[in-house]
Image: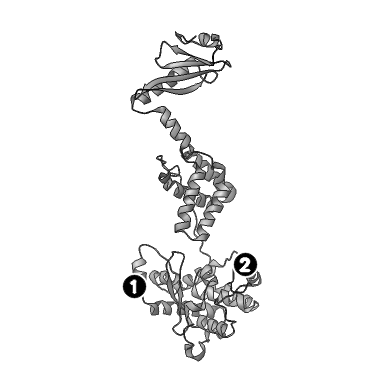
């Protein structure tokens, strides 16, 4: 039957299973500490206290897990929390109901799909599945700074510093929105330093241009023209792939990109060789809306990786990527003493300190700077034919 006595290891061990389902015995040393003996023989320590007039029973642990001294210490801790106005049972229930990392990622994807481009949120999904999904069932409060540091270091060793930093950035952004799910803890990514990254500065050197242009000449018109336009406009690959005739004003030499990486439209001036290339493509075209059509009818060119590999192999280029063409135009503009605002305007950069300046710049100074850079590139590459090219009919083909 239930009793009250001074808890000791020997007395607890001597308690026999009751004839009923369970029996509670009270410690005479620490009020509220009880041990429950079940009919099965299992013995569990509890702390019992009335909170707001209602009896509250908090499980401390089994006799096998806790000594009498440890049980008293745990009970005293619970008593202290209650004295501070907390309800341990409610807090435990909240922890059981707390969002998991999987819940947070699902919430993040709803946000990302509403505010980010498909390419960006699909990359978030890939990173999560590759690196964070093993944590999907963990409650948010169980993910600590040390866990993040360990994961970041592991990814840096196994996947490289850039991949590790991207995962860290994603996890930090996810936790920044965790309060939407009721999470009130700190962001475990705070204070975790990303690896130092070195910005890539590769561009086509003057001694490489002749070989590059020769390699281009061996390509079909589609790929040759695509990479020439990429080089001489400095536009991003995705924008060049999705270039449409409706966005081009070849009479004035302008290309309106409906949406750039920053989500805003951009008007780029087209240098004369680019206008000539585009006019030739238009005259030889088949009515497709895309300047660089793909294999499927009505679709644009997707990913010219194979063509690029052929080109750099023929040209003998090492460590050269398609994005380096964009960097090449900016580099030759800089070497021609063109100011950073003009370069930024041509490349569509959105640096906070210079955005206002870019917005006020006229197209003609940008065109002059681009013409200068294009002339330097074509001259170094021995491309006199392209250098001398002028739009047919004096550029009066009309808006296409």
**Is 154 situated above or below 110?**
above
Secondary element at tag 1 = helix
Residue 53 or 322: which is nearer the viewer? 53
Question: In the rendering, which numbered label is found on residue 163?
Answer: none
Q: Could you tell whether 341 is left or right of 321 in the image?
A: left
Q: Residues within 10 Å of mark 1 (few under 14, many from 20)?
A: few
Q: Residue at x 50, y 9 (%)?
A: 1
Q: Give the residue at mark 2.
A: 305
Where residue 287 appears, x then y in whole percent? 57, 81
State the separation of the CA atoms marked 1 and 2. 37 Å
**Is 252 situated above or below 84?**
below
Instruction: Count all numbered tags in the image, as a single digit.
Output: 2
Q: Residue lying furthest front in this view?
A: 20
Q: Residues within 10 Å of mark 2 (few under 14, many from 20)?
A: few
Secondary element at tag 2 = helix
Where residue 75 appears, x then y in whole percent? 42, 20
Residue 281 at least partly seen: yes
Q: Residue at x 52, y 60 (%)?
A: 119
Residue 169 at least partly seen: no
Q: Could you tell whether 245 is left or right of 363 in the image?
A: right
Q: Give the residue at mark 1.
A: 360
Where residue 164 appears, x then y in whole percent? 53, 49
Where residue 169 appears, x then y in whole percent? 47, 51
């Amino acid at each position: 039957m239930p009793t009250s006595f001074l808890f000791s290891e020997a007395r607890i061990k001597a308690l026999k299973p009751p004839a009923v389902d369970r029996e509670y015995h009270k410690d005479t040393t620490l009020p509220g500490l009880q041990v429950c003996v079940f009919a099965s023989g299992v013995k569990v320590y509890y702390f019992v206290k009335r909170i707001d007039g209602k009896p509250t029973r908090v499980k401390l642990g089994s006799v096998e897990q806790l000594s009498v001294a440890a049980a008293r210490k745990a009970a005293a801790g619970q008593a202290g929390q209650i004295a501070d106005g907390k309800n341990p049972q409610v807090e435990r229930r909240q922890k059981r109901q707390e969002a998991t990392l999987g819940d947070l990622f699902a919430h993040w994807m709803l946000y990302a799909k509403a505010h980010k481009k498909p390419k960006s949120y699909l990359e978030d999904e890939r990173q999560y599945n590759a690196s964070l999904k093993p944590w999907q069932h963990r409650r948010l409060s169980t993910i600590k700074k040390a866990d993040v540091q360990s994961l970041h270091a592991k990814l840096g060793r196994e996947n490289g510093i850039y991949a590790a930093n991207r995962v860290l950035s994603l996890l930090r952004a996810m936790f920044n929105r965790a309060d939407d799910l009721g999470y009130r803890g700190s962001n475990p990514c705070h204070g975790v330093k990303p690896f130092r990254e070195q910005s890539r500065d590769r561009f086509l050197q003057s001694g490489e241009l002749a070989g590059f242009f020769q390699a281009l000449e061996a390509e079909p018109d589609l790929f040759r023209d695509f990479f020439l336009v990429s080089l001489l406009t400095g536009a991003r690959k995705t924008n060049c792939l999705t270039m449409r005739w409706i966005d081009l004003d070849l009479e004035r030499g302008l290309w309106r990109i409906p949406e750039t990486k920053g989500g805003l439209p951009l008007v780029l001036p087209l240098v004369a060789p680019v206008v000539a290339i585009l006019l030739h493509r238009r005259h030889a075209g088949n009515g497709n809306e895309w300047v660089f059509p793909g294999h499927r009818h009505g679709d644009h060119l997707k990913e010219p990786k194979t063509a690029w590999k052929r080109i750099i192999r023929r040209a003998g280029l090492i460590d050269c990527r398609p994005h380096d063409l964009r960097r090449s135009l900016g580099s030759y503009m800089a070497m021609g003493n063109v100011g950073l605002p003009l370069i930024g305007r041509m490349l569509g950069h959105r640096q906070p300190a210079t955005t206002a300046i870019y917005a006020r710049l006229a197209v003609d100074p940008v065109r002059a700077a681009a013409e200068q850079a294009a002339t330097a590139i074509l001259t170094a590459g021995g491309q006199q034919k392209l250098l001398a090219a002028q739009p047919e009919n004096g550029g009066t083909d009309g808006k296409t």
